[in-house]
Image (spheres, rainbow, N blue to C red):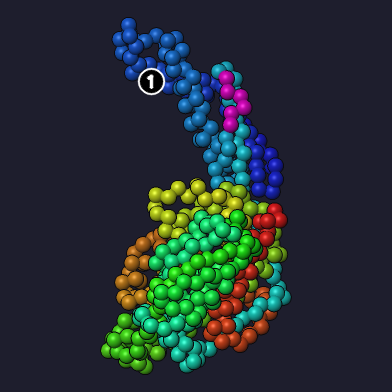
């Protein structure tokens, strides 16, 4: 077997492989003899069909079968001998495939890029310092009360925060437009779930009243045929309801798993959960700044096969998130919606793998169990969660990957200048959300300019 490797780009290799004709023709001949033993043709006994007939009938199919097997086997042997690290599957095509001639085929493949890490030394990192106050706990309890509130019909004019039950029909000019009508629709005034200006015009409306609302669709409205247009809605109000907040009593508290309905335990549990949430928001914000800095100074080529794998995974996540069902064909979702973000994820993954390798980072079963125990605290039966994870190798691998990522980020963080910034609980969550939106916007901008 002769092998030549051509470097066509930083991550693409073109391998030309030659296999002696005698090996291929011998394998084809042997395969045809085996085939002849089982051939049944009219006028011949089984196993007595002349080889010339067998060759004419089955020769090409048998040769294709043999050549396909040989190309796969010799490709694997070639990349092993040449020390190549493929990223994804190759494209293999025969260039010479004739009886009596050496088989020649070409395999075009992507390899993992060689990464020489550039330090992020001196990068400024902003780290929020958050303390959950009693006022924050009070506000969270109010939020829980609102989430568990009942709606009680009232004989009064609708106010901000009330729920109205309405029928409506939208018009552009005098013509009703598609998707602009509903019957018995419930709407909370102030929820901002309708077109800007719609909800505010319902303040003061009473049950049985008919109103005409004038609004303008936003310029960036998702339905292009409506974007920026003025519209009129004819609305009939059937019912006005106000929120009836539950009392923070033992019955209410027990809904959240606090036995006995103890107020102090309830507040302590809420504060513990909020502190954990704030800590995660801080960690994510710091981590994202570190990874952004790492990507910025380490532009590396990314194998398209890995990007496609990540894109496919993101499609499956999106289908699950939007409840499209297990049978939904994710190939219907366009790659363009996910590719740029997938490329960024792959880039980060390759860079972090190099950080992990360079620093010889690892995580044993003890570290994995400690991490799982920490995660299990938010469940009702932590011991059961720990046992389930530690008994599942796939889940353990996922946790190990998360631990190694944390360790890699911590190593990178050592190279940076950290500036602590005091923030309230709400500010920390808002900052984390803003960071996520900025990263998403940056990815969309990169995609648009590509």
Task: Name the residue at 47% across, 65% down.
Answer: 168
Picture quarter containing residue 21?
top right
Q: Secondary structure at mark 1?
A: helix
**Number of numbered discs visible in the structure rendering:** 1
Q: Who's the residue at 70% across and 65% down the image?
A: 296
Q: Which residue is at the front of the view, 56 or 29?
A: 56
- The N terminus - image quarter: top right
Was residue 396 drawn as part of the magenta stretch in this picture? no
In the displayed structure, would residue 268 be above or below residue 346?
below
State the extent of the magenta-drawn residues as a range.
93-98
* Chief secondary structure of the magenta portion: strand
Left or right: 302 as drawn, with respect to 131: right
Please identify the quarter of the rendering in which residue 426 is found: bottom right
Pinpoint residue 312: horizontal percent, then vertical percent: 51, 52
Can residue 276 be seen here? The reply is no
Give residue 57's quadrant in the image. Answer: top left
Of residue 242 and residue 40, the one placed in the foreground of this image is 242
Q: Residue 87: image x %, image y %?
A: 57, 48
Q: Which residue is mark 1?
A: 34
Q: Name the residue furthest top.
A: 43
Residue 201 in the image, given as x and y percentages of width and height: 54, 75
């Amino acid at each position: 077997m002769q092998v030549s490797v051509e470097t066509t780009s930083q991550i693409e290799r073109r391998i030309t492989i030659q296999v002696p004709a005698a090996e291929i023709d011998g394998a084809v001949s042997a395969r045809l003899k085996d085939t002849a033993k089982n051939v049944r043709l009219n006028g011949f006994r089984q196993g007595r069909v002349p080889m010339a007939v067998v060759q004419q009938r089955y020769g090409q199919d048998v040769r294709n079968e043999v050549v396909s097997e040989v190309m796969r086997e010799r490709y694997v042997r070639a990349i092993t001998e040449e020390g190549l690290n493929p990223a994804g599957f190759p494209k293999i095509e025969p260039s010479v495939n004739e009886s009596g001639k050496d088989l020649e085929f070409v395999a075009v493949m992507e390899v993992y890029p060689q990464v020489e890490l550039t330090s992020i030394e001196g990068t400024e990192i902003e780290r929020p310092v958050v303390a959950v106050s009693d006022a924050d706990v009070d506000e969270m309890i109010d939020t829980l009360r609102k989430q568990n509130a009942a709606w009680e019909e009232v004989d009064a004019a609708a106010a901000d925060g009330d729920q109205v039950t309405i029928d409506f029909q939208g018009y552009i000019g005098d013509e009703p437009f598609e998707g602009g009508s509903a019957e018995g629709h419930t709407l909370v005034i102030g929820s901002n779930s309708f077109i800007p200006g719609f909800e505010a015009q319902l303040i003061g409306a009473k049950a049985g009243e008919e109103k005409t609302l004038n609004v303008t669709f936003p310029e960036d409205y998702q339905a292009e045929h409506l974007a920026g247009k003025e519209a009129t809605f004819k609305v009939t109000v059937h019912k006005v309801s106000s929120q009836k907040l539950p009392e923070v009593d033992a019955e209410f508290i027990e809904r959240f798993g606090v036995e006995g309905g103890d107020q102090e335990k309830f507040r302590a549990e809420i504060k513990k959960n909020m502190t954990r949430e704030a800590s995660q928001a801080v960690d994510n914000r710091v981590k994202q700044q570190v990874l952004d800095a790492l990507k910025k100074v380490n532009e590396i080529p990314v194998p398209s096969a890995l990007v496609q794998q990540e894109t496919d995974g993101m499609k499956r996540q999106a289908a699950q998130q939007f409840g499209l069902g297990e049978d939904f064909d994710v190939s219907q979702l366009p790659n363009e919606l996910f590719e740029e973000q997938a490329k960024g994820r792959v880039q980060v993954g390759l860079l972090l793998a190099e950080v992990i390798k360079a620093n010889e980072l690892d995580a044993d079963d003890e570290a994995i169990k400690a991490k799982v125990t920490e995660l299990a605290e938010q469940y009702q039966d932590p011991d059961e969660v720990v046992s389930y994870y530690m008994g599942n190798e796939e889940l353990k691998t996922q946790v190990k990957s998360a631990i190694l990522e944390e360790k890699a980020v911590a190593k990178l963080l050592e190279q940076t200048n950290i500036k602590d910034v005091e923030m309230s609980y709400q500010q920390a969550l808002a900052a984390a959300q803003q960071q996520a939106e900025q990263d998403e916007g940056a990815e969309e901008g990169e995609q648009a300019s590509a």
